[in-house]
Image (cartoon, grey):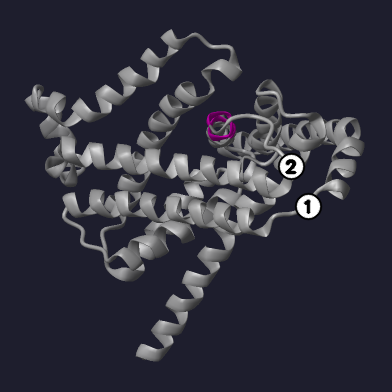
Amino acid sequence: MNPSRRTLLLRVVATLLTIAIVIALVGVGRRDGPAALAAWRAAHIRWGWIAAASAVALVGQVVFSLGWRRFLADCGVSLTVWQALRMYLASNLGRYLPGGKAWQMSIVGVMAAEGGWPAATLAGTSLLQGTIGVVTGALLLLVTGAEAMGLRTAWLIVPAIGLVCVLAAPALLRQFPHIRETAVNKWPPLDSINARTMWALVWTSGVSWLCWGVGLYALAHGLLDQPGTSLGAYIAAWIGPFIAGLVAIVAPAGLGVRDTMMGVMLAAAGVSPGDRLIVVVVARIWGTVLEVVPAGIVLLIHRHTRRESK
């Protein structure tokens, strides 16, 4: 297919999907809006819970960036905690554009070139960390949300196998010298990755998912008289929609997809229509603020530091 036609087709698909998402959100708003408005008017916002929710979620972002820093160190690239956090937070801004992952990799590449680091290594490690994060998130999703999703416990074997394969990948690769040599020739840092590297990526991803899920639960405590369901259900209601938003690459930051799925999962967990609409709407604003504002702050600090050093 001609590249221009392919681009046009993708734009048409993205437009149709966006329209469908907007229609669905309008339908949900018309159906549950009155109940949500009544619940909001009766609500007593607990700012302490909301502050705690924000703090826990921010810790999750820091932990995830530390996992990436460890990965880069094993690949022979040394970054300070501040440098890794700055690049990670800034790259998250790319998710708010269609085809977010490509934009994230582009931002990482540009910032790497600016700092004199190997752009391919930083972008490649970021992409691989994200993939491992999805596998880890899928396992946590099934552990925390299997009951709400009506899945049997046996389904846990799927992400568990994926997790085992991730941890064993470096050792398995060494069993096939020719494949390993080809892979290392194309991406030399691969030679220094071991099981400890993979485990660091798994546990930091897991902690990050759990922090955001706990943050969502605390946010619900700050907005509602009662969250309406368990901590585990809220963790699943964060992870599942977030992964769905990543899959829906044409939706910026999973807009619409994440929100709709979060509502569905909270409904399955027993949260009332008005309460879940409040949580879904505020969670979108809350999550966006916690990603955009810290990124803007670290970029402004970096810009100011560069000016002072000149």
Q: Is residue 15 visible in this depiction of the protein? A: yes
Q: Is residue 233 magenta?
A: yes
Q: Nearer the viewer, residue 109 or 278?
A: 278
Does residue 255 sit above or below 292 in this rendering?
Answer: above
Query: As drawn, is 104 to the left or to the right of 193?
Result: right
Q: Quadrant of residue 177?
A: top left
Q: Which range of residues does the magenta coloring cover?
A: 232-237
Task: Give the amino acid type for the residue marked by disc 2 in the picture.
Answer: Asp
State the image coordinates of residue 154 (x, y, percent, origin top left).
42, 8
x 15%, y 27%: residue: 173
Magenta-colored stretch includes residue 249: no
At x 55%, y 46%, the residue is 215
Quadrant that contains the C terminus? bottom left
149 with respect to 63 (left or right): right
Question: Residue 286, image x and y in percent?
Answer: 64, 53
Q: Which mark is residue 44?
A: 1
* SS type, badge 2: loop
**In the depicted view, which residue is nearer to us: 176 or 92?**
92
- In front here: 85 or 18? 85
Residue 73 or residue 191, whichever sits in front: 73
- Which is nearer the N-term, disc 2 or disc 1? 1
- The location of residue 54, given as percent across then percent down, is 56, 56
- Residue 225: assigned label: 2
